[in-house]
Structure formats: structure tokens, C-alpha cells
Image (spheres, rainbow, N blue to C red):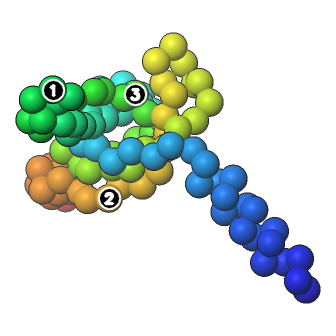
Amino acid sequence: MAETPNKTEAVEQTSSRRNEKVGLVVSTKMQKTIVVEIEMRKAHPKYKRVMKSNKKFYAHDEQNSARVGDVVRIREARPLSKLKRWSLEEIVRRSSLAQLADDKSSATEA
């Protein structure tokens, strides 16, 4: 029985080893792929002024569930294509624009 907690700790450590980032979805035009923009804030080495820089990451979205404007968490994965090295972990916050689009599409279906 003493071995069970150690095994679960080891499993948690190996699963949390992969890098995670939280960012904003800027494009969903590809199938099963989203483009996530992440804003990084870093102090300038000499002038100490906080500077913002943006970087885009291509992430795999199996169900095509993310919409433009959503805040999502992505996790590092094995290379899936030339540019895709991340996968969608979860949608942290839905965009209000995405909710309006869903309402309009359901209204037109009815």
C-alpha cells in the first residue's frame, strides 16, 4: 500500500513535465488547427522597461471546438506537422463573439 502514492506522484510528475501556455485564439481557418497568440512581457536588460512581444503557436484542435477570441491552454506535443508542435488542452474562457455566433447559427437553423 505504501507504493501506491509514489506511483501516482510519478505519474503526475511525468504528465506535468510538458510545457503549457495560455493565449488567445487568433485563427481557426484550418481544419483541426488553431493559431494561438501568446503575449510575453519581459524587462529590457539595460533599461528595465517592461516590453511586450507576441508569438504565434500552431496547435492541434481535434474537435474544432475553439473559436476566434477564446482564451485557451495549449500543451507541448510531438511534432504533428511542419509547424504544429502543440495541442489544445482546454478552453479557459469562451469569447463573447463566439457565443453571439452560436446564437445566430441556432436561430437560422430553427
Question: In terms of secondary structure, where does tag 3 sit?
Answer: strand
- Please rate how many residues cluster around mark 3, counting C-alpha atoms within 10 Å: few if below 14, some from 14 to 19, many from 20: many
Q: Earlier in the sequence, mark 3 or mark 1?
A: 1
Name the mark on residue 46. 1
> Which three-letter amino acid code belongs to the residue tagged 2?
Val
Callout 2: SS? strand
Q: Position of residue 13 (x, y in %)?
A: 66, 58
Along the viewing direction, whichever of 58 and 107 lies nearer the viewer: 58
Q: Is residue 13 above or below residue 86?
A: below
Of 52 and 86, the residue lying toward us: 52
Cα–Cα gap, marks 2 and 1: 35 Å
Tell me where residue 28 sits by quadrant.
Answer: top left
Give the Cα distance between marks 3 and 1: 32 Å
Label 3 or label 2, whichever comes before in sequence order: 3
Mark on residue 58?
3
Tell me if residue 44 can be seen: yes
Residue 22 image point, x, y percent: 33, 48
Name the residue located 80 percent from the left edge and 72 percent from the top edge.
6
Per the image, label 1 sits on a secondary structure element best described as loop
In the rendered image, the quadrant that contains the C terminus is bottom left
Identity of the residue drawn at 21% across and 36% down: 42
Left-right relation of 50 to 63: left
Tell me, yes or no, whether the two marked residues, 3 and 2, touch with CB atoms within 8 Å.
Answer: no
Seen from the viewer's position, the closer of residues 1 and 80 is 1
Q: Please report the residue visible at 28 percent of the width from the left and 27 percent of the height from the top.
A: 55
Q: Residue at x 12, y 56 (%)?
A: 96
Disc marking residue 92: 2
